[in-house]
Image (cartoon, rainbow, N blue to C red):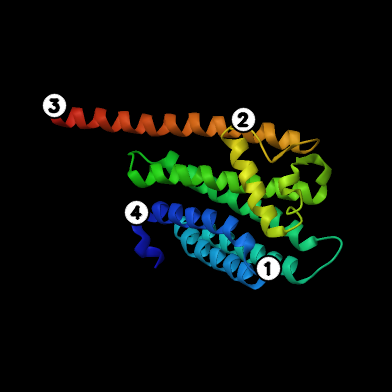
């Protein structure tokens, strides 16, 4: 199946990310068992797709280890209740590392290409969304450790105690920060969130500028090579 994804692996990854983004907020109103089943289904989809994105053996091995660890931490948080919330803390730490690793691999491959392909452009978009997911887990971790560092509107304050809703709202917060659209229901109120926000804002602008420049450069180089071949 991994080989069958072929040159359109990033398109499949994008479709999976879109499905996950739609299911995450919808699943908040499901029963607990249904939400857990939905979460595990999304993890299973990401295992297949992301292992296809990781082409080298060491990349797949590390990705699989991280995914298994994220999965185990999620189960621990769901079923092992305790005041320290170690399962949730480990989940967000490991998930942030996993998504950051996926972004690094995707970007490395884009910058190693000598020609531009449609799947590479889609891969750049996937990297952008995965980066938002990485930062979203960082914000969720900050909330678990320093809840006073966020200002949360009354309309969502009563639901933030739900871990599934937490994951959705902080991914939403991350997208708003990455795209510099601003905040509404949730905003920063203290450290270390201020530091995370300016780092993500700079990263978002830098990502767009550098990746777009790389893709445009590849397109121009490809056009120049084609013109030279036509003129010979």
- The residue at which mark 4 appears reads as 7
Name the mark on residue 231: 3
- The residue at which mark 1 appears reads as 72
Of mark 3 and mark 2, the one earlier in the sequence is: 2
Of mark 1 and mark 3, the one earlier in the sequence is: 1
Q: In the rendered view, tell whether residue 58 sits above or below residue 217.
A: below
Q: Residue furthest front?
A: 155
Depth check: give the residue in front, 106 or 182: 182
**Residue at the image point whose x is 39% and y is 68% from the top:** 1
**Residue 17: percent from the left, percent from the top?**
50, 54
Name the secondary structure under disc 2: helix
Of mark 4 and mark 1, the one earlier in the sequence is: 4
**Which image quadrant for residue 179?**
top right
Name the mark on residue 225: none
The alpha-carbon separation of the residues under discs 1 and 2 comes to: 33 Å
Let me know if residue 55 appears in the view: no
Name the secondary structure under disc 4: helix
- The residue at which mark 2 appears reads as 202
For discs 4 and 3, the disc positioned in front in the rendered view: 4
**Residue at the image point whose x is 45% and y is 52% from the top:** 14
The alpha-carbon separation of the residues under discs 4 and 1 comes to: 31 Å
């Amino acid at each position: 199946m991994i080989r069958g994804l072929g040159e359109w692996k990033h398109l499949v990854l994008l479709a999976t990310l879109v499905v996950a983004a739609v299911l995450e907020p919808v699943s908040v109103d499901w029963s607990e068992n249904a939400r857990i089943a939905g979460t595990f289904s999304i993890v299973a989809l990401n295992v297949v797709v992301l292992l296809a994105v990781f082409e080298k053996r060491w990349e797949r091995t590390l990705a699989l280890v991280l995914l298994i660890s994220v999965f185990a931490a999620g189960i621990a948080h769901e079923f092992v209740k305790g005041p320290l919330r170690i399962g949730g803390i480990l989940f967000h730490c490991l998930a942030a590392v996993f998504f950051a690793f996926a972004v690094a691999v995707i970007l490395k491959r884009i910058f190693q290409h000598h020609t531009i392909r449609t799947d590479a452009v889609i891969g750049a978009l996937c990297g952008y969304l995965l980066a938002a997911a990485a930062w979203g887990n960082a914000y969720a971790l900050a909330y678990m450790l320093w809840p006073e560092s966020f200002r949360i509107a009354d309309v969502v304050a009563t639901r933030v105690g739900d871990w599934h809703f937490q994951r959705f709202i902080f991914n939403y917060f991350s997208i708003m920060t990455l795209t510099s659209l601003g905040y509404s229901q949730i905003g920063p109120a203290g450290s270390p969130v201020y530091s995370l926000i300016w780092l993500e804002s700079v990263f978002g602008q830098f990502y767009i500028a550098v990746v777009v420049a790389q893709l445009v450069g590849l397109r121009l180089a490809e056009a120049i090579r084609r013109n030279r071949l036509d003129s010979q």
